[in-house]
Image (cartoon, rainbow, N blue to C red):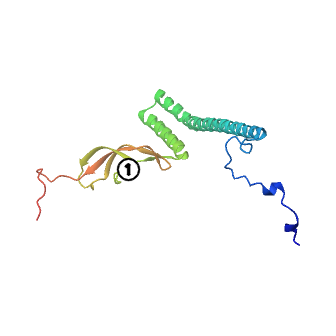
């Protein structure tokens, strides 16, 4: 005799398994009060975590902005500190009673000091005379026919351009050679 045929089934075995399709309000649909409290606590905990993360991020953002401002101010202060000696030299030159040649020599020395200070910080001047005109780096003040100059070539630099590394700080102001029109204003005739 097998064990399955010897004992009658229990009432639990005979009851149908819950399918989730019971009518609303049945005892199996009602959530337990402990489960509701647990879920409410979990939601409150998650809200608290979100608020804390948001506050931490806002504090971090403000700290980064403050550090960036402080770094920029430090860089400007350092550059100005380096340039103050040159400014003092220029003021001394203006107050000097020497000859024009002596004053000129003092100004040239001061200009070299300023250029060395800028160069040490990665700032370099650019005189593009003789180079091809580059509208990204040069500002053309005029286009004129210039005998012996190739069309589109910078033939005069009125103000140097400056670069910080590869970043343009100030474009050079230039005069650009333009193809000369034939004399008489008439276009050249074809063959």
Indicate left or right for 166 with 28 as reference.
left
Mark 1 Cα-neighbour bin, 10 Å: few <14, some 14–19, many ≥20: many
* Residue found at x 72% / y 37%: 40
Can you say whether 26 is above or below 89 in the image? below
Q: Which residue is mark 1?
A: 128
178 with respect to 58 (left or right)? left
Position above or below: 184 against 3: above
- Residue 63 in the image: x percent, y percent? 64, 36
| Residue at 32% in and 50% down | 154
Q: Position of residue 136 (x, y in %)?
A: 38, 48
Q: In the image shown, does 100 or 162 lie closer to the viewer?
A: 162
From where the camera sits, is residue 97 visible? no
- Which of the two residues, 83 or 50, is positioned nearer the viewer here? 50
What kind of element bears circle 1? loop
Task: Locate the C terminus and report the quarter of the image it occupies.
Answer: bottom left
Q: Where, quadrant-wise, is the N terminus in this rendering?
A: bottom right
What residue is rendered at 35% in x and 48% in y? 135
Left or right of 189 on screen, residue 144: right
**Count of labels in the image:** 1
Can residue 109 be seen at all in this image of the molecule?
yes
Q: Indicate left or right for 160 with 2 as reference.
A: left
Q: Residue at x 51, y 40 (%)?
A: 114
- Name the image quarter holding residue 148: bottom left
Residue 79 position within the rendered picture, expressed as x and y whole percent measured from the top left: 56, 38
């Amino acid at each position: 005799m097998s064990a399955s045929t010897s004992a009658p089934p229990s009432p639990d075995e005979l009851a149908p398994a819950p399918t989730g399709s019971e009518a609303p309000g049945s005892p199996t649909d009602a959530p337990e009060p402990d489960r509701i409290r647990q879920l409410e606590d979990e939601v409150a905990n998650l809200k608290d975590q979100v608020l804390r993360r948001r506050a931490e991020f806002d504090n971090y953002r403000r700290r980064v902005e403050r550090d960036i401002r402080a770094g920029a101010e430090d860089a400007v202060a350092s550059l100005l500190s380096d340039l103050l000696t040159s400014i003092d030299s220029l003021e001394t030159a203006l107050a000097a009673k020497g000859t024009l040649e002596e004053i000129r020599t003092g100004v040239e020395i001061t200009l070299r000091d300023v250029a060395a200070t800028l160069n040490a910080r990665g700032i370099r001047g650019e005189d593009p005379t003789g180079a091809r005109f580059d509208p990204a780096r040069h500002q053309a003040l005029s286009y004129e026919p210039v005998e012996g100059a190739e069309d589109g070539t910078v033939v005069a630099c009125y103000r140097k351009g400056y670069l910080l590394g590869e970043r343009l700080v100030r474009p050079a102001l230039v005069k650009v050679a333009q193809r000369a029109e034939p004399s008489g204003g008439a276009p050249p005739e074809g063959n």
